[in-house]
Amino acid sequence: MLRREQRKKRYYSIGFVLPCLVLALFVLIPFLGPSYKTLDLALKIIIFASLVASFDIMLGYTGILSFGHGMFFGIGAYCVAFLNGKYGDPTYFHLFLGLLLAVAVACVLALIVSLISLRVKAIFFAMITLALAELTIVLANKLSHFTGGEDGISISLPGIFSAAFSPGSFLGLDISGRVITYYFILLACLGLFALMLRFTHSPLGRVLQAIRDNTDRAEALGYKTFYFQTLSIVLGCTVAAMTGGLYAMWVGYVNPESTLEVMAIMLNVLLMVIIGGMGTLYGGIVGAAFLLITQTFLPDLQKLAIDLFPNASLLHTILERWLLLFGILFILVVIFFPKGVVGSAREFIARARGEAFFSS
Amino acid sequence: MNDAVLKADNLQTYIGHHHILQGISFEARADAVTVLIGRNGAGKSTTLKTLMGLLPPSEGVIVYNGMNIQGKRPYEIARMGIGYVPEDMGIFADLTVEENFKVAKLKEDEATAGRLDRILELFGALGKFWHAPAGNLSGGQKQMLAIGRAMVNNISLLLIDEPSKGLAPIIVEALIEAINQIKEECVVVLVEQNFYMASAVGDYFHILDDGRIVHSGRMEALVDDEELKSRYLGISKSKS
Protein backbone atom coordinates (compact mmCIF):
# COMPACT_ATOMS: atom_id res chain seq x y z
CA MET A 1 0.00 0.00 0.00
CA LEU A 2 2.78 2.36 1.08
CA ARG A 3 4.81 1.39 -1.96
CA ARG A 4 1.87 2.14 -4.27
CA GLU A 5 1.51 5.55 -2.67
CA GLN A 6 5.23 6.24 -3.10
CA ARG A 7 5.08 5.17 -6.73
CA LYS A 8 2.05 7.40 -7.34
CA LYS A 9 3.87 10.32 -5.73
CA ARG A 10 6.89 9.65 -7.93
CA TYR A 11 4.81 9.70 -11.10
CA TYR A 12 3.62 13.21 -10.24
CA SER A 13 7.09 14.51 -9.38
CA ILE A 14 8.93 16.97 -11.61
CA GLY A 15 11.77 14.47 -11.95
CA PHE A 16 9.43 12.08 -13.76
CA VAL A 17 7.04 14.42 -15.59
CA LEU A 18 9.71 16.67 -17.16
CA PRO A 19 11.75 13.86 -18.80
CA CYS A 20 8.48 12.35 -20.10
CA LEU A 21 7.54 15.69 -21.67
CA VAL A 22 10.99 16.00 -23.25
CA LEU A 23 10.68 12.47 -24.62
CA ALA A 24 7.20 13.24 -26.00
CA LEU A 25 8.64 16.33 -27.72
CA PHE A 26 11.35 14.26 -29.42
CA VAL A 27 8.77 11.66 -30.49
CA LEU A 28 6.58 14.37 -32.02
CA ILE A 29 9.34 16.39 -33.69
CA PRO A 30 9.08 14.65 -37.11
CA PHE A 31 5.38 15.62 -37.10
CA LEU A 32 5.93 19.16 -35.78
CA GLY A 33 8.84 20.19 -37.97
CA PRO A 34 9.57 17.62 -40.63
CA SER A 35 12.31 19.67 -42.33
CA TYR A 36 15.71 18.02 -42.54
CA LYS A 37 17.34 20.78 -40.47
CA THR A 38 14.94 20.30 -37.54
CA LEU A 39 15.17 16.53 -37.67
CA ASP A 40 18.96 16.68 -37.91
CA LEU A 41 19.21 19.07 -34.96
CA ALA A 42 16.83 17.00 -32.81
CA LEU A 43 18.69 13.81 -33.55
CA LYS A 44 22.09 15.31 -32.84
CA ILE A 45 20.73 16.55 -29.49
CA ILE A 46 19.57 13.01 -28.69
CA ILE A 47 22.90 11.43 -29.66
CA PHE A 48 25.05 14.04 -27.92
CA ALA A 49 22.84 13.93 -24.81
CA SER A 50 23.62 10.19 -24.55
CA LEU A 51 27.32 10.81 -25.26
CA VAL A 52 27.48 13.52 -22.57
CA ALA A 53 25.63 11.29 -20.11
CA SER A 54 28.18 8.52 -20.71
CA PHE A 55 30.97 11.04 -20.06
CA ASP A 56 29.11 12.15 -16.92
CA ILE A 57 29.11 8.56 -15.61
CA MET A 58 32.89 8.74 -15.56
CA LEU A 59 33.51 12.36 -14.58
CA GLY A 60 30.41 13.35 -12.61
CA TYR A 61 29.75 10.04 -10.86
CA THR A 62 33.20 8.53 -10.50
CA GLY A 63 35.54 11.52 -10.71
CA ILE A 64 37.57 10.15 -13.64
CA LEU A 65 38.56 12.59 -16.37
CA SER A 66 38.97 11.15 -19.85
CA PHE A 67 40.25 13.00 -22.89
CA GLY A 68 39.53 9.97 -25.05
CA HIS A 69 35.77 9.98 -25.00
CA GLY A 70 35.71 11.43 -28.50
CA MET A 71 38.00 8.59 -29.58
CA PHE A 72 35.51 5.95 -28.37
CA PHE A 73 32.75 7.85 -30.18
CA GLY A 74 34.84 7.76 -33.36
CA ILE A 75 35.72 4.07 -32.95
CA GLY A 76 32.00 3.26 -32.75
CA ALA A 77 31.33 5.30 -35.89
CA TYR A 78 34.14 3.57 -37.80
CA CYS A 79 33.00 0.09 -36.71
CA VAL A 80 29.57 0.70 -38.25
CA ALA A 81 31.16 2.30 -41.33
CA PHE A 82 33.54 -0.62 -41.90
CA LEU A 83 30.77 -3.20 -41.95
CA ASN A 84 28.21 -1.10 -43.86
CA GLY A 85 30.41 0.69 -46.30
CA LYS A 86 34.00 -0.31 -46.94
CA TYR A 87 34.00 -4.00 -46.00
CA GLY A 88 30.39 -5.08 -46.14
CA ASP A 89 27.12 -4.62 -47.97
CA PRO A 90 24.29 -2.83 -46.21
CA THR A 91 22.38 -5.61 -44.47
CA TYR A 92 20.59 -5.72 -41.12
CA PHE A 93 23.10 -8.31 -39.97
CA HIS A 94 26.04 -6.07 -40.83
CA LEU A 95 24.41 -3.13 -39.10
CA PHE A 96 23.84 -5.18 -35.96
CA LEU A 97 27.37 -6.61 -36.21
CA GLY A 98 28.82 -3.10 -36.63
CA LEU A 99 27.14 -1.89 -33.45
CA LEU A 100 28.21 -5.07 -31.66
CA LEU A 101 31.77 -4.61 -32.86
CA ALA A 102 31.70 -1.02 -31.56
CA VAL A 103 30.69 -2.30 -28.12
CA ALA A 104 33.30 -5.07 -28.13
CA VAL A 105 36.21 -2.87 -29.28
CA ALA A 106 35.31 -0.10 -26.82
CA CYS A 107 34.93 -2.60 -24.00
CA VAL A 108 38.33 -4.23 -24.60
CA LEU A 109 40.16 -0.93 -25.17
CA ALA A 110 38.60 0.69 -22.07
CA LEU A 111 39.54 -2.35 -20.03
CA ILE A 112 43.15 -2.28 -21.24
CA VAL A 113 43.52 1.48 -20.60
CA SER A 114 41.97 1.10 -17.13
CA LEU A 115 44.25 -1.80 -16.23
CA ILE A 116 47.31 0.15 -17.33
CA SER A 117 46.48 3.55 -15.82
CA LEU A 118 44.24 3.09 -12.78
CA ARG A 119 46.74 0.90 -10.96
CA VAL A 120 48.79 4.04 -10.46
CA LYS A 121 46.49 7.04 -10.16
CA ALA A 122 43.22 8.12 -11.79
CA ILE A 123 44.92 11.16 -13.41
CA PHE A 124 47.03 8.83 -15.55
CA PHE A 125 43.82 7.73 -17.19
CA ALA A 126 43.35 11.28 -18.54
CA MET A 127 46.92 11.37 -19.84
CA ILE A 128 46.84 7.94 -21.47
CA THR A 129 43.45 8.55 -23.12
CA LEU A 130 44.70 11.86 -24.53
CA ALA A 131 47.77 10.18 -26.02
CA LEU A 132 45.72 7.28 -27.39
CA ALA A 133 43.16 9.62 -28.92
CA GLU A 134 45.85 11.54 -30.78
CA LEU A 135 47.39 8.26 -31.93
CA THR A 136 44.01 7.09 -33.24
CA ILE A 137 43.64 10.20 -35.40
CA VAL A 138 47.12 9.69 -36.84
CA LEU A 139 46.34 6.02 -37.55
CA ALA A 140 42.99 6.87 -39.15
CA ASN A 141 44.76 9.32 -41.47
CA LYS A 142 47.86 7.25 -42.24
CA LEU A 143 46.25 3.84 -42.71
CA SER A 144 44.17 5.21 -45.56
CA HIS A 145 43.93 1.87 -47.42
CA PHE A 146 42.17 0.50 -44.33
CA THR A 147 40.25 3.53 -43.00
CA GLY A 148 39.74 5.59 -46.13
CA GLY A 149 42.12 8.25 -44.79
CA GLU A 150 40.97 11.85 -44.98
CA ASP A 151 38.33 10.92 -47.58
CA GLY A 152 36.58 8.78 -45.01
CA ILE A 153 33.97 6.09 -45.63
CA SER A 154 30.44 6.48 -46.93
CA ILE A 155 27.79 4.33 -45.29
CA SER A 156 24.77 2.71 -46.86
CA LEU A 157 21.96 1.53 -44.66
CA PRO A 158 19.83 -1.55 -45.29
CA GLY A 159 16.10 -1.87 -46.05
CA ILE A 160 13.85 0.35 -43.99
CA PHE A 161 16.77 2.60 -42.97
CA SER A 162 17.86 3.45 -46.52
CA ALA A 163 17.09 6.93 -47.84
CA ALA A 164 15.17 5.44 -50.77
CA PHE A 165 12.68 3.60 -48.57
CA SER A 166 9.28 5.30 -48.70
CA PRO A 167 6.24 3.18 -47.76
CA GLY A 168 3.73 6.05 -47.58
CA SER A 169 2.50 8.59 -45.07
CA PHE A 170 1.08 8.50 -41.55
CA LEU A 171 -0.93 11.37 -40.00
CA GLY A 172 0.37 13.68 -42.70
CA LEU A 173 3.99 12.73 -42.21
CA ASP A 174 5.86 11.16 -45.11
CA ILE A 175 7.42 8.05 -43.64
CA SER A 176 10.87 7.67 -45.13
CA GLY A 177 14.05 5.84 -44.31
CA ARG A 178 15.28 9.00 -42.54
CA VAL A 179 12.22 9.11 -40.29
CA ILE A 180 12.53 5.42 -39.43
CA THR A 181 16.26 5.87 -38.72
CA TYR A 182 15.35 8.84 -36.48
CA TYR A 183 12.95 6.72 -34.42
CA PHE A 184 15.38 3.80 -34.31
CA ILE A 185 18.16 6.02 -32.97
CA LEU A 186 15.75 7.71 -30.53
CA LEU A 187 14.74 4.30 -29.20
CA ALA A 188 18.36 3.11 -28.97
CA CYS A 189 19.43 6.28 -27.12
CA LEU A 190 16.45 5.95 -24.80
CA GLY A 191 17.61 2.42 -24.00
CA LEU A 192 21.17 3.61 -23.36
CA PHE A 193 19.91 6.45 -21.17
CA ALA A 194 17.68 4.07 -19.19
CA LEU A 195 20.66 1.74 -18.71
CA MET A 196 22.80 4.60 -17.39
CA LEU A 197 20.01 5.83 -15.10
CA ARG A 198 19.56 2.31 -13.70
CA PHE A 199 23.32 2.04 -13.19
CA THR A 200 23.69 5.35 -11.34
CA HIS A 201 20.58 4.78 -9.18
CA SER A 202 21.67 1.29 -8.13
CA PRO A 203 23.76 0.56 -5.01
CA LEU A 204 26.69 0.43 -7.42
CA GLY A 205 26.06 4.07 -8.38
CA ARG A 206 26.19 5.04 -4.71
CA VAL A 207 29.55 3.33 -4.35
CA LEU A 208 30.83 5.24 -7.39
CA GLN A 209 29.76 8.54 -5.81
CA ALA A 210 31.49 7.52 -2.59
CA ILE A 211 34.68 6.80 -4.57
CA ARG A 212 34.39 10.18 -6.31
CA ASP A 213 33.96 11.98 -2.95
CA ASN A 214 36.76 10.17 -1.12
CA THR A 215 38.59 7.28 -2.75
CA ASP A 216 40.68 6.37 0.32
CA ARG A 217 37.63 6.37 2.56
CA ALA A 218 35.69 4.15 0.15
CA GLU A 219 38.61 1.70 0.11
CA ALA A 220 38.82 1.76 3.91
CA LEU A 221 35.11 0.90 3.99
CA GLY A 222 35.92 -2.34 2.18
CA TYR A 223 35.54 -1.49 -1.52
CA LYS A 224 38.10 -2.48 -4.11
CA THR A 225 37.89 0.94 -5.77
CA PHE A 226 39.90 -0.09 -8.82
CA TYR A 227 37.22 -2.63 -9.76
CA PHE A 228 34.40 -0.08 -9.49
CA GLN A 229 36.32 2.62 -11.39
CA THR A 230 37.05 0.14 -14.17
CA LEU A 231 33.38 -0.82 -14.37
CA SER A 232 32.36 2.82 -14.68
CA ILE A 233 34.95 3.47 -17.40
CA VAL A 234 33.96 0.40 -19.40
CA LEU A 235 30.28 1.38 -19.28
CA GLY A 236 30.97 5.03 -20.16
CA CYS A 237 33.25 4.15 -23.09
CA THR A 238 30.94 1.43 -24.41
CA VAL A 239 27.97 3.81 -24.47
CA ALA A 240 30.16 6.42 -26.19
CA ALA A 241 31.06 3.89 -28.89
CA MET A 242 27.38 2.97 -29.33
CA THR A 243 26.42 6.62 -29.77
CA GLY A 244 29.25 6.94 -32.31
CA GLY A 245 27.81 4.01 -34.24
CA LEU A 246 24.34 5.57 -34.19
CA TYR A 247 25.77 8.93 -35.27
CA ALA A 248 27.43 7.24 -38.25
CA MET A 249 24.08 5.70 -39.18
CA TRP A 250 22.51 9.17 -39.22
CA VAL A 251 25.17 11.18 -41.06
CA GLY A 252 26.00 8.30 -43.45
CA TYR A 253 29.65 9.23 -43.58
CA VAL A 254 32.68 9.06 -41.31
CA ASN A 255 36.09 10.65 -41.61
CA PRO A 256 38.77 11.52 -39.04
CA GLU A 257 37.69 15.17 -38.98
CA SER A 258 34.01 14.59 -38.23
CA THR A 259 34.11 11.64 -35.86
CA LEU A 260 37.63 11.40 -34.50
CA GLU A 261 38.51 15.07 -34.05
CA VAL A 262 39.15 14.47 -30.40
CA MET A 263 39.63 18.00 -29.13
CA ALA A 264 36.62 19.40 -31.00
CA ILE A 265 34.30 16.62 -29.79
CA MET A 266 35.78 16.68 -26.29
CA LEU A 267 35.42 20.45 -26.06
CA ASN A 268 31.76 20.19 -27.05
CA VAL A 269 31.17 17.35 -24.58
CA LEU A 270 32.91 19.28 -21.78
CA LEU A 271 30.87 22.42 -22.52
CA MET A 272 27.67 20.37 -22.58
CA VAL A 273 28.44 18.69 -19.26
CA ILE A 274 29.33 22.04 -17.64
CA ILE A 275 26.17 23.71 -18.95
CA GLY A 276 23.90 20.78 -18.02
CA GLY A 277 25.50 19.94 -14.69
CA MET A 278 27.95 17.26 -13.63
CA GLY A 279 26.66 14.15 -11.85
CA THR A 280 23.09 14.62 -13.05
CA LEU A 281 22.84 12.57 -16.31
CA TYR A 282 19.82 14.66 -17.41
CA GLY A 283 22.20 17.61 -17.64
CA GLY A 284 23.46 16.02 -20.87
CA ILE A 285 20.12 16.71 -22.57
CA VAL A 286 20.10 20.37 -21.45
CA GLY A 287 23.77 20.88 -22.34
CA ALA A 288 23.46 19.23 -25.75
CA ALA A 289 20.26 21.16 -26.54
CA PHE A 290 21.77 24.50 -25.50
CA LEU A 291 25.00 24.04 -27.40
CA LEU A 292 23.59 22.57 -30.59
CA ILE A 293 20.63 24.96 -30.80
CA THR A 294 22.84 28.01 -30.29
CA GLN A 295 25.45 26.67 -32.74
CA THR A 296 22.73 26.07 -35.33
CA PHE A 297 20.71 29.25 -35.00
CA LEU A 298 23.19 31.93 -33.87
CA PRO A 299 24.86 32.08 -37.33
CA ASP A 300 21.38 32.77 -38.81
CA LEU A 301 20.89 35.80 -36.58
CA GLN A 302 22.91 38.03 -38.89
CA LYS A 303 20.62 37.18 -41.82
CA LEU A 304 17.59 37.90 -39.66
CA ALA A 305 19.07 41.23 -38.53
CA ILE A 306 19.77 42.27 -42.15
CA ASP A 307 16.13 41.56 -43.03
CA LEU A 308 14.70 43.36 -40.01
CA PHE A 309 17.19 46.23 -39.63
CA PRO A 310 18.88 46.75 -43.01
CA ASN A 311 20.73 49.93 -41.92
CA ALA A 312 22.11 48.72 -38.55
CA SER A 313 25.61 47.88 -39.78
CA LEU A 314 27.08 47.68 -36.25
CA LEU A 315 24.49 45.06 -35.31
CA HIS A 316 25.33 43.10 -38.47
CA THR A 317 29.03 43.17 -37.58
CA ILE A 318 28.35 41.99 -34.03
CA LEU A 319 26.06 39.20 -35.18
CA GLU A 320 28.58 38.12 -37.77
CA ARG A 321 30.81 37.11 -34.85
CA TRP A 322 28.21 34.77 -33.43
CA LEU A 323 30.85 32.86 -31.45
CA LEU A 324 31.26 35.99 -29.35
CA LEU A 325 27.54 35.87 -28.54
CA PHE A 326 27.87 32.19 -27.74
CA GLY A 327 30.74 32.99 -25.36
CA ILE A 328 28.61 35.60 -23.58
CA LEU A 329 25.70 33.15 -23.28
CA PHE A 330 28.04 30.50 -21.89
CA ILE A 331 29.43 32.92 -19.30
CA LEU A 332 25.88 33.86 -18.26
CA VAL A 333 24.94 30.20 -17.82
CA VAL A 334 28.03 29.56 -15.68
CA ILE A 335 27.31 32.66 -13.54
CA PHE A 336 23.62 31.95 -12.98
CA PHE A 337 23.88 28.14 -12.86
CA PRO A 338 27.22 27.41 -11.16
CA LYS A 339 26.37 23.71 -10.85
CA GLY A 340 24.95 23.52 -14.37
CA VAL A 341 21.29 24.02 -15.22
CA VAL A 342 20.07 20.68 -13.84
CA GLY A 343 22.47 20.69 -10.86
CA SER A 344 21.47 24.21 -9.81
CA ALA A 345 17.76 23.48 -10.33
CA ARG A 346 18.05 20.40 -8.13
CA GLU A 347 19.82 22.41 -5.46
CA PHE A 348 17.14 25.08 -5.65
CA ILE A 349 14.36 22.49 -5.25
CA ALA A 350 16.17 20.81 -2.35
CA ARG A 351 16.56 24.19 -0.64
CA ALA A 352 12.92 25.01 -1.23
CA ARG A 353 11.99 21.75 0.46
CA GLY A 354 13.98 22.87 3.47
CA GLU A 355 16.60 20.13 3.30
CA ALA A 356 19.50 22.52 3.41
CA PHE A 357 18.76 24.31 6.63
CA PHE A 358 20.91 22.65 9.20
CA SER A 359 23.24 24.32 11.56
CA SER A 360 26.84 23.77 10.68
CA MET B 1 46.90 -15.25 28.81
CA ASN B 2 47.53 -12.72 26.04
CA ASP B 3 44.16 -11.18 25.10
CA ALA B 4 45.49 -8.72 22.50
CA VAL B 5 43.15 -8.30 19.50
CA LEU B 6 45.68 -6.17 17.67
CA LYS B 7 49.43 -6.26 17.97
CA ALA B 8 51.71 -3.81 16.18
CA ASP B 9 55.41 -4.56 16.29
CA ASN B 10 58.19 -2.20 15.22
CA LEU B 11 56.17 -0.22 12.65
CA GLN B 12 58.35 1.96 10.45
CA THR B 13 56.43 4.23 8.10
CA TYR B 14 57.66 6.86 5.65
CA ILE B 15 55.64 9.64 4.04
CA GLY B 16 57.73 10.67 1.06
CA HIS B 17 61.26 10.97 2.44
CA HIS B 18 60.09 11.68 5.99
CA HIS B 19 60.52 8.88 8.48
CA ILE B 20 57.32 9.32 10.50
CA LEU B 21 56.88 6.11 12.51
CA GLN B 22 60.19 4.96 13.95
CA GLY B 23 59.43 1.63 15.54
CA ILE B 24 55.91 1.80 16.99
CA SER B 25 54.95 -1.28 19.02
CA PHE B 26 51.78 -1.65 21.04
CA GLU B 27 48.82 -3.91 21.74
CA ALA B 28 45.10 -3.26 21.81
CA ARG B 29 43.44 -5.52 24.36
CA ALA B 30 39.97 -6.97 24.25
CA ASP B 31 37.15 -5.11 26.01
CA ALA B 32 39.24 -2.00 26.39
CA VAL B 33 39.91 1.38 24.85
CA THR B 34 43.56 1.97 23.97
CA VAL B 35 44.39 5.63 23.54
CA LEU B 36 47.29 6.93 21.47
CA ILE B 37 48.07 10.36 22.79
CA GLY B 38 50.72 12.94 22.01
CA ARG B 39 51.47 16.33 20.55
CA ASN B 40 50.79 17.39 16.95
CA GLY B 41 53.04 15.61 14.49
CA ALA B 42 53.90 12.80 16.92
CA GLY B 43 52.64 10.15 14.45
CA LYS B 44 49.27 9.25 15.97
CA SER B 45 47.16 9.56 12.80
CA THR B 46 49.94 7.95 10.75
CA THR B 47 49.80 4.96 13.10
CA LEU B 48 46.09 4.47 12.41
CA LYS B 49 46.60 4.91 8.66
CA THR B 50 49.39 2.34 8.79
CA LEU B 51 47.20 -0.13 10.69
CA MET B 52 44.45 0.38 8.09
CA GLY B 53 46.81 -0.20 5.15
CA LEU B 54 46.44 3.35 3.83
CA LEU B 55 50.15 3.99 4.48
CA PRO B 56 51.97 0.68 4.14
CA PRO B 57 54.89 0.41 6.57
CA SER B 58 58.37 -0.27 5.26
CA GLU B 59 59.03 -2.56 8.21
CA GLY B 60 57.11 -4.12 11.05
CA VAL B 61 54.35 -6.59 11.71
CA ILE B 62 50.65 -6.02 12.37
CA VAL B 63 48.78 -8.97 13.81
CA TYR B 64 45.01 -8.80 14.04
CA ASN B 65 43.12 -11.70 15.65
CA GLY B 66 46.19 -13.91 15.17
CA MET B 67 46.62 -13.03 11.48
CA ASN B 68 49.40 -10.96 9.96
CA ILE B 69 47.63 -8.17 8.07
CA GLN B 70 50.73 -6.19 7.15
CA GLY B 71 50.84 -5.63 3.39
CA LYS B 72 47.12 -6.13 2.90
CA ARG B 73 45.07 -3.50 1.04
CA PRO B 74 42.65 -1.26 2.98
CA TYR B 75 39.56 -2.95 1.53
CA GLU B 76 40.86 -6.36 2.62
CA ILE B 77 41.58 -5.08 6.12
CA ALA B 78 38.12 -3.50 6.33
CA ARG B 79 36.52 -6.78 5.30
CA MET B 80 38.38 -8.57 8.10
CA GLY B 81 36.36 -6.58 10.63
CA ILE B 82 38.28 -3.38 11.29
CA GLY B 83 36.33 -0.13 11.22
CA TYR B 84 38.12 3.17 10.69
CA VAL B 85 37.01 6.74 11.36
CA PRO B 86 39.52 9.17 9.82
CA GLU B 87 40.41 12.57 11.25
CA ASP B 88 38.45 14.36 8.49
CA MET B 89 35.53 11.97 9.08
CA GLY B 90 35.39 11.09 5.36
CA ILE B 91 31.68 11.77 5.05
CA PHE B 92 30.23 11.38 1.55
CA ALA B 93 28.72 14.86 1.48
CA ASP B 94 26.51 14.44 -1.59
CA LEU B 95 24.88 11.25 -0.29
CA THR B 96 22.12 11.31 2.31
CA VAL B 97 22.66 9.96 5.83
CA GLU B 98 20.77 6.82 4.82
CA GLU B 99 22.89 6.40 1.68
CA ASN B 100 26.09 6.83 3.71
CA PHE B 101 25.02 3.86 5.83
CA LYS B 102 23.92 1.86 2.78
CA VAL B 103 27.27 2.40 1.07
CA ALA B 104 29.13 1.37 4.21
CA LYS B 105 27.16 -1.85 4.72
CA LEU B 106 29.05 -4.52 2.85
CA LYS B 107 26.61 -7.36 3.41
CA GLU B 108 23.30 -8.10 5.01
CA ASP B 109 23.43 -11.12 7.31
CA GLU B 110 22.58 -12.28 10.81
CA ALA B 111 25.72 -10.72 12.27
CA THR B 112 24.83 -7.25 10.98
CA ALA B 113 21.07 -7.45 11.54
CA GLY B 114 19.94 -4.89 14.07
CA ARG B 115 23.21 -2.96 13.99
CA LEU B 116 21.58 0.06 12.44
CA ASP B 117 18.99 0.18 15.23
CA ARG B 118 21.81 -0.03 17.75
CA ILE B 119 23.68 2.82 16.03
CA LEU B 120 20.57 4.99 16.01
CA GLU B 121 20.16 4.17 19.70
CA LEU B 122 23.68 5.50 20.28
CA PHE B 123 23.35 8.52 17.99
CA GLY B 124 19.66 9.39 18.01
CA ALA B 125 20.18 12.72 16.23
CA LEU B 126 21.04 10.93 12.98
CA GLY B 127 17.53 9.51 12.64
CA LYS B 128 16.10 13.02 12.39
CA PHE B 129 18.24 13.79 9.35
CA TRP B 130 17.94 10.38 7.70
CA HIS B 131 17.08 11.68 4.23
CA ALA B 132 19.18 14.87 4.39
CA PRO B 133 22.46 15.25 2.48
CA ALA B 134 25.28 14.39 4.88
CA GLY B 135 27.16 17.51 3.80
CA ASN B 136 24.50 19.61 5.52
CA LEU B 137 24.98 18.04 8.96
CA SER B 138 26.72 19.89 11.77
CA GLY B 139 30.25 18.92 12.83
CA GLY B 140 29.02 16.81 15.74
CA GLN B 141 26.40 15.04 13.63
CA LYS B 142 29.01 14.32 10.97
CA GLN B 143 31.27 12.76 13.61
CA MET B 144 28.37 10.62 14.85
CA LEU B 145 27.67 9.54 11.28
CA ALA B 146 31.35 8.73 10.70
CA ILE B 147 31.54 6.55 13.84
CA GLY B 148 28.14 4.97 13.22
CA ARG B 149 29.01 4.23 9.62
CA ALA B 150 32.22 2.46 10.65
CA MET B 151 30.17 0.22 12.98
CA VAL B 152 27.49 -0.80 10.48
CA ASN B 153 29.37 -3.99 9.58
CA ASN B 154 30.30 -6.80 11.92
CA ILE B 155 33.52 -5.27 13.26
CA SER B 156 35.61 -6.33 16.22
CA LEU B 157 38.08 -3.43 16.18
CA LEU B 158 37.32 0.26 15.73
CA LEU B 159 40.05 2.81 14.98
CA ILE B 160 38.95 6.40 15.68
CA ASP B 161 41.09 9.41 14.85
CA GLU B 162 40.54 12.53 16.99
CA PRO B 163 36.76 12.46 17.26
CA SER B 164 36.60 15.49 19.59
CA LYS B 165 38.46 17.81 17.23
CA GLY B 166 36.61 21.10 16.79
CA LEU B 167 33.52 19.98 18.68
CA ALA B 168 31.61 21.81 21.41
CA PRO B 169 32.04 20.44 24.97
CA ILE B 170 28.45 19.18 25.09
CA ILE B 171 28.99 17.13 21.90
CA VAL B 172 32.27 15.79 23.33
CA GLU B 173 30.31 14.60 26.39
CA ALA B 174 27.84 12.80 24.11
CA LEU B 175 30.72 11.15 22.23
CA ILE B 176 32.34 10.05 25.49
CA GLU B 177 29.10 8.39 26.53
CA ALA B 178 28.75 6.71 23.13
CA ILE B 179 32.36 5.43 23.06
CA ASN B 180 31.96 4.07 26.61
CA GLN B 181 29.04 2.02 25.30
CA ILE B 182 30.80 1.04 22.08
CA LYS B 183 33.73 -0.42 24.02
CA GLU B 184 31.38 -3.05 25.46
CA GLU B 185 30.84 -4.31 21.90
CA CYS B 186 34.23 -4.00 20.22
CA VAL B 187 37.83 -3.10 20.87
CA VAL B 188 38.59 0.58 20.35
CA VAL B 189 41.88 2.24 19.46
CA LEU B 190 41.47 5.97 19.87
CA VAL B 191 43.78 8.75 18.78
CA GLU B 192 43.09 11.82 20.86
CA GLN B 193 44.69 15.13 21.79
CA ASN B 194 41.92 16.17 24.13
CA PHE B 195 43.18 14.74 27.43
CA TYR B 196 39.79 15.12 29.08
CA MET B 197 38.19 12.84 26.51
CA ALA B 198 41.16 10.45 26.42
CA SER B 199 41.03 9.96 30.18
CA ALA B 200 37.23 9.66 30.23
CA VAL B 201 37.13 6.71 27.82
CA GLY B 202 40.63 5.21 27.87
CA ASP B 203 41.72 2.09 29.74
CA TYR B 204 45.29 2.02 28.44
CA PHE B 205 47.46 4.78 27.00
CA HIS B 206 50.52 5.07 24.80
CA ILE B 207 52.25 8.45 24.55
CA LEU B 208 53.78 9.08 21.13
CA ASP B 209 56.60 11.51 20.60
CA ASP B 210 58.55 11.94 17.34
CA GLY B 211 57.25 8.68 15.89
CA ARG B 212 58.08 6.57 18.95
CA ILE B 213 56.11 5.34 21.94
CA VAL B 214 57.77 6.91 24.94
CA HIS B 215 55.39 5.82 27.71
CA SER B 216 52.63 3.24 28.12
CA GLY B 217 50.43 2.09 30.93
CA ARG B 218 47.00 2.20 32.49
CA MET B 219 45.10 5.46 32.06
CA GLU B 220 44.63 5.97 35.82
CA ALA B 221 48.40 6.12 36.23
CA LEU B 222 48.70 8.86 33.57
CA VAL B 223 45.89 10.90 35.13
CA ASP B 224 47.89 11.02 38.37
CA ASP B 225 51.30 11.61 36.76
CA GLU B 226 51.58 15.40 36.48
CA GLU B 227 55.22 15.31 35.42
CA LEU B 228 54.52 13.01 32.44
CA LYS B 229 51.52 15.06 31.33
CA SER B 230 53.49 18.25 31.54
CA ARG B 231 56.52 16.88 29.66
CA TYR B 232 54.78 15.15 26.74
CA LEU B 233 51.32 16.64 26.54
CA GLY B 234 51.99 20.20 27.71
CA ILE B 235 49.34 19.97 30.42
CA SER B 236 50.17 21.83 33.62
CA LYS B 237 48.41 21.06 36.89
CA SER B 238 46.34 24.22 36.77
CA LYS B 239 45.13 23.40 33.21
CA SER B 240 44.09 19.84 34.03
Image: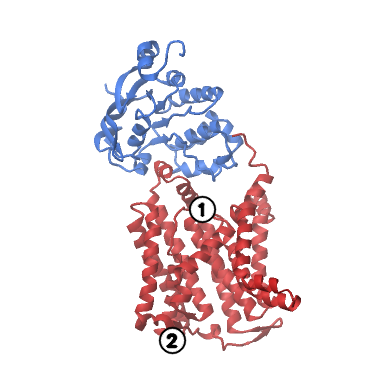
Chain colours: A red, B blue
> Relative to residue A26, is residue B4 depicted above or below?
above
Which type of secondary structure does the marked residue at label 1 adopt?
loop
Across and down, in percent, residue B109 comes to: 44, 41
Judging from the image, mark 2 belongs to the subunit labelled A
> In the image, what residue type sits under mark 1?
Ser
Q: Residues within 10 Å of mark 2 (few under 14, many from 20)?
A: some
> In the image, what residue type sits under mark 2?
Asp
Across and down, in percent, residue A12 comes to: 69, 55
> Relative to residue A93, is residue A25 depicted above or below?
above
Give the label, 2 or 1, closer to the camera: 2
State which tag comes first along the sequence, 2 or 1. Answer: 2
Residue topped by disc 2: A89
Which type of secondary structure does the marked residue at label 2 adopt?
loop
Viewer-proximal residue among A142 and A155: A142
Q: CA distance from mark 2 to mark 1?
A: 41 Å
- Judge if badges 2 and 1 mark residues of a common chain: yes
Residue topped by disc 1: A202
Across and down, in percent, residue A194 comes to: 55, 62
Viewer-proximal residue among B92 and B215: B215
